[in-house]
Amino acid sequence: MSEAGKAQIVSFPADAEGSAARLAMAEAVRMAEALIFASAEPVSERALAERLPSNVDVPAVLKMLQADYHRRGVNLVRSGDAWAFRTAPDLTFLMSREAVQQRKLSRAALEVLAIVAYHQPVTRAELEDIRGVETSRGTLDVLMETGWIKMRGRRRVPGRPVTYGTTESFLDHFGLPDIRDLPGMEELRGAGLLSARMPAHFSIPVPRVDPDELADDEDPLTDIDLEELGLLTPKVEQD
C-alpha cells in the first residue's frame, strides 16, 4: 500500500472523532440555549452542568452561545454566576413604550441601596451611621420586596444584628456581570452623580468579590433566626 493510502487510513478516525466532537458541542449549545431561554430567571453554570451531558465544557458552551447571539436583537449576558437572554443594549429604546414602572424608589431607598451595594455586608446601624440619619424599617422592606437586597446573616457582635447584601436579581436588573462592576469614583463623577465639592477624604469602598460568601465576622442565618425575623413559618407540632 502506498504511503498516501496509509496516511488516509490513519487520518480518517481523527477526522471522524473531530466531527463527532463538533456535533456534540453544537448539540450542547442547543441544549444550553433551550434551558436558558425557557427559564424565567438567570440560569447558573452549576444548574446547566447538572442538565447537560457530563463531559461537556460548560464555560466553552456558554462562550460559543454568547458569540452566536453577539449581533442579534437579544444577547446572552452573565449576571454573577448565572446567564440570561436580554435585549441588546442598543435596542432597549424599543421596549421603553411597553415598560411599566411599578414603583419609583424614594431617595432614601436609593441611598440605602447604594450603601448596601458598596458596603455589604452592612447592618442597619452601620447604614444609619453612613447616611447620618435614621433608616426606617419600611425602606429596607421595600428594597427586599424588589428582590434587590436580602438578609445575609448575623454580625458576630453583642446583639447579633442582621447584615444585608445585594442579590443576583440586583445584578441582573442593573446589567452587572459581577458586583465588582459597580461604577467607581471617577465613573460616578463623570456621570455627574457626585458633587465636584466632595470632601478630600471621601472614598468609595470596593465591593466584596463574592457577595454570597459570609465574612469572617458573620454567622449564617439559622431556621430560628428566620422564624424570629418572620421569614420562616413556624412549624406546628402535630399530636
Image (tube, helix red, strand yellow):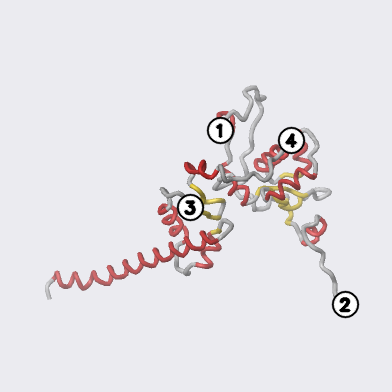
Q: Are marks 3 and 4 in contact (CB under 8 Å)?
A: no
SS class of the residue under badge 1? helix
Q: What is the C-alpha distance between the residues marked 3 and 1?
A: 25 Å
Residue under label 3:
76
Q: Which mark is residue 187?
A: 1
Q: As shown in the figure, which amino acid type bears the numbered disc 4?
A: Ile
Disc on the earlier residue, 3 or 4 = 3
Mark closer to the observer (2, 1): 2
Q: Nearer the viewer, mark 1 or mark 4?
A: 1
Q: Secondary structure at mark 4?
A: helix
Dot 2 lies on which element? loop
Q: Which residue is mark 4?
A: 130
Query: Label 2, on which residue?
Result: 239
Foreground: 154 or 58?
A: 58
Query: Residue at horizontal 65%, vertical 40%?
Result: 118
3D distance between C-alphas at marks 3 and 2: 53 Å
The vertical placement of 54 against 105, above or below, is: below
Q: Nearer the viewer, residue 175 or 5?
A: 175
Q: Nearer the viewer, mark 3 or mark 1?
A: 3
Q: CA distance from mark 3 to mark 4?
A: 37 Å
- Mark 4, Cα crowd under 10 Å, few <14 / some 14-19 / many 20+, is few
Local secondary structure at mark 3: strand
Q: Quadrant of residue 183?
A: top right
Q: CA distance from mark 2 to mark 4?
A: 50 Å
Residues under numbered marks 3 and 2 in contact, where contact means CB atoms less than 8 Å apart: no
